[in-house]
Image (tube, grey):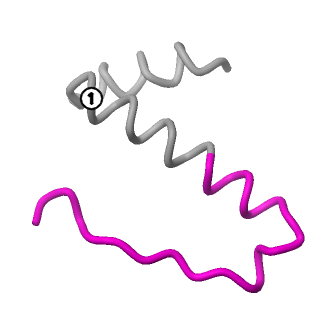
């Protein structure tokens, strides 16, 4: 699955274009971190987009 297909799948699930693109970017970054040697030594902080 490529990035465009991922965005399209989120759009079909009711996300707006900006949120769908943002979610795909977040998914990619988190996957890269999870597969790196830093996966046990990192903390992700943030706030909900609903706040």
Q: Is residue 49 left or right of residue 31?
A: left
Q: Residue at 53% of width from left, 14% of height from top?
A: 4
Residues in magenta? 29-51
Q: Is residue 44 above or below residue 4?
A: below
Q: Is residue 31 left or right of residue 27?
A: right
Q: Nearer the viewer, residue 43 or 16?
A: 43
Mark 1 = which residue? 18
Q: Residue at 62% of width from left, 50% of height from top?
A: 29
Q: Give percent across and percent down for residue 42.
A: 66, 80
Q: How many discs mark residues in the rendered view?
A: 1
> Main structural element of the magenta stretch: helix, strand or loop?
loop
Residue 17 occupies quadrant: top left
Return the residue found at the far right.
37
**Is the C terminus in the top left, top right, bottom left or bottom right quadrant?**
bottom left
Q: Is residue 11 left or right of residue 31?
A: left
Q: Is residue 15 above or below residue 4?
A: below
Q: Residue at 77% of width from left, 83% of height from top?
A: 40
Q: Give percent across and percent down for residue 16.
A: 20, 26
Q: Dot 1: what SS? A: helix
Residue 10 occupies quadrant: top left
Assess whether residue 35 is covered by the magenta stretch. Answer: yes
Q: Is residue 31 above or below residue 4?
A: below
Q: Residue at 31% of width from left, 20% of height from top?
A: 12
Q: Give percent across and percent down for residue 30.
A: 62, 56
Q: Nearer the viewer, residue 9 or 28?
A: 28
**Is the N terminus in the top left, top right, bottom left or bottom right quadrant?**
top right
Q: Is residue 50 above or below residue 17?
A: below
Assess whether residue 36 is covered by the magenta stretch. Answer: yes
Return the residue found at the far left.
51
Mark 1 burial class by Cα count in 10 Å: few <14, some 14-19, many 20+: few
């Amino acid at each position: 699955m490529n990035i465009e297909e991922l965005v399209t799948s989120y759009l079909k699930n009711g996300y707006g274009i900006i949120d769908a693109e943002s979610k795909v970017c977040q998914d990619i970054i988190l996957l890269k971190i999870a597969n790196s040697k830093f996966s046990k030594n990192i903390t992700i902080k943030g706030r909900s987009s609903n706040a």
